[in-house]
Image (cartoon, grey):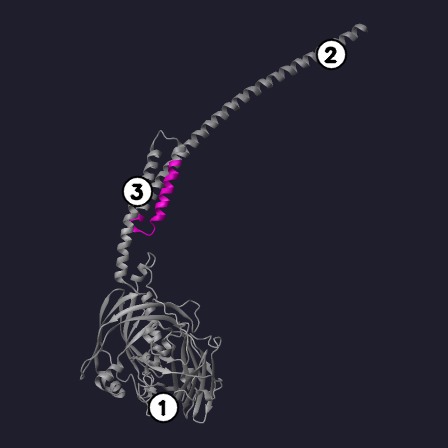
Amino acid sequence: MKKLIGIICVVAALCLTMTVFSFAATADIVNTSVEGTAVVDGVKDEAYDNAEALEFVQKGVNYGANVVLDEPIGYAYIINDSEWVYVYIEVIDDTIDKSNVNTYEQDSTEVFWMDDNVKYQLRCNFDSETSVSGNGKDWAEKGAEVVGVTTDTGYAVEYKFPITDVLNNQIEMCIQINVCSNGTRNYTCYILGNQDGDNAVRRLSRDETDWDVWWTLTLAGEFEDTREETEVPALEITVDNYQEIQEMSLAAQVYGQESVSWSNWTTVGYNTIDFGETVDISWDFDQYTLSGLFTADNTNNWTVTPAFAIQISDNGTLQLPDDAEVGDTGDSARFTYTYSDVTITATGYDDVVISGETVTSNWTIKEEGGWQSGISRTIDLINPIMETLGLDLQTTVEEYLPAITNVSLSVSYDAYELVTLADIEEFLVQLDAEDEELLASLQEYIDRVDAAEEIINDENSTLEEKEDALDDATKAANRATKLSEDYEKSSAAAAELKERVEELTATVEALSGDTTEEEALETEEEVAEDTDSSSSSSDSGSTGLVVGIVILVVVIVVVVVVVVLGKKKKA
């Protein structure tokens, strides 16, 4: 059932979240700020005059096919004072559009920064409409500001955010422009070399090394380090969690999806990789065709790269709270896996081989409104295909993809929260050693039960002695059970003691019951004797009373007779 839930989550997530990546070393991009303070009103202050004009010429790898523009469509200027970073962005655009209900598919800019190792993302369009998703909801409470205005050449947006997470006088950040028309995002745009910024939104913290596509800003002035670099330890293995870890699995599948309206996706096969195992995977396309899946319309006339990739996902391990609302996050975990070189075979073309790697993914499941994100990572296939074979996007989609016959690789599930199968096995060896040691120490409690049994079975022992012996045996068995509850062999020995004590209890209760019956019988006999004695006394008393009454009557009669006779003589 758990795996079925995982499949459902994966399929739902694919409908809207699938993007591909071909990471460049974007984290190596360094830009420099200059000293200054600005009023955040959408107007470019003189303070920006000495700032470098960062040109936006690089289309995103996902939304723009990684194309470099002939001329910039915007410029960014960055300054800072002792507390704040100010970013002024000029966008050159003669078709400003916000007809789509999704703010990210409206003409807008986005700025990303870290605050206490949490991603803050602030999106703003040309009339100051702002939006964030998930992390960064409290940006205003942090003192951040943003204003958007229209200009003669398009629009401008000005941002202010706090200087946080400083290391070596530098911070990490990213800037993005969303270029839209007719209700559709045509492409995203970045400074040169930052094409993988398309995935900046996926980076929830600096620990998200999969999505390390931000760049570095060197601050003007001198700042103390405020970034706390902490090494997160491996999960502690316990008797309560080691079996659950062993039962976890990852899932792998191939999917294809156009990325303009998030539709026309498909999957090929579904493979499960159990914890600590390596699975050879081969997806056969003989009975499957990618022909017609992607068209000029759903790729914005071959400018938006469709998704064709391998997805590695958590297979249902991460769960959301039952009452999760849109934007809420749930479970987080680190998964380490290794995938081998990926070989793509297509009729009429040389094999394309994509180098494998070992990846530690920090995944946090997030509610997006009927589907979940943050539960997978993708291995891009389409960009390496184009780079290896020298094909443009249209040729790749229309000719190469339908010719694919096989995609193969192997995937191993190496660790969960840095715990490996070898760690589990080592833990089990240690657990067994502790079990054996404890089993030997339980002899003390076994001896106490043996001694109690001897007393209880001794006919010469009094009932009180038997009851005391039973009480000690019960305490011994309970203590043994408590000590051994985490150990298999010791638990079995303790269970045996409990059974013996139950038998001894029954024996003592029976003896106690017999004694009570004898005492009751003796009491009844004594009562009977007392009753007989009382009856005899009562009978004697009754007889005496009768005799007395008779004598009294006789006396009275005699007296009356004497009196009567006396009266007659006088007469």
Residue 488 drawn at (x, y percent): 30, 51
Magenta run includes residue 180: no
Badge 2: few (under 14), some or many (20 or more) residues near its Cα, within 10 Å? few
Residue shown at the point (74%, 8%) measured from the top left: 562
Residue shown at the point (33%, 90%) measured from the top left: 69
Residue type, label 1: Pro
> Disc 3 vs disc 2: which is toward the camera?
3
Would you say 209 lies left or right of 47 here?
A: left
- Disc number for residue 323: none
Residue 200 sits in quarter: bottom left
Please tell me which residue lies in front, 445 or 164: 164
Task: Please tell me whether the stretch drawn in magenta is mainly helix, strand or loop.
Answer: helix
Relative height, residue 458 to residue 54 (above, below): above
SS label for mark 1: loop
**Distance from label 3 to label 2 (Cα)?**
100 Å
Residue 283 sits in quarter: bottom left
Answer whether residue 44 is visible to the viewer in this image: no
- Disc number for residue 560: 2
Would you say 290 lies left or right of 542 here?
A: left
Answer whether residue 38 is visible to the viewer in this image: yes
- Disc number for residue 443: 3
Residue type, label 2: Val
Which image quarter is the N terminus in? bottom left
Which image quarter is the C terminus in? top right
Residue 156 drawn at (x, y percent): 44, 88
Say which residue label 1 marks. Answer: 72
Work out which residue is located at the far top of the displayed protein and give it. 569
**Distance from label 1 to label 2 (Cα)?**
156 Å
SS label for mark 3: helix
Residue type, label 3: Gln
Please tell me which residue lies in front, 36 or 321: 36
Q: Which residues are magenta?
A: 468-491
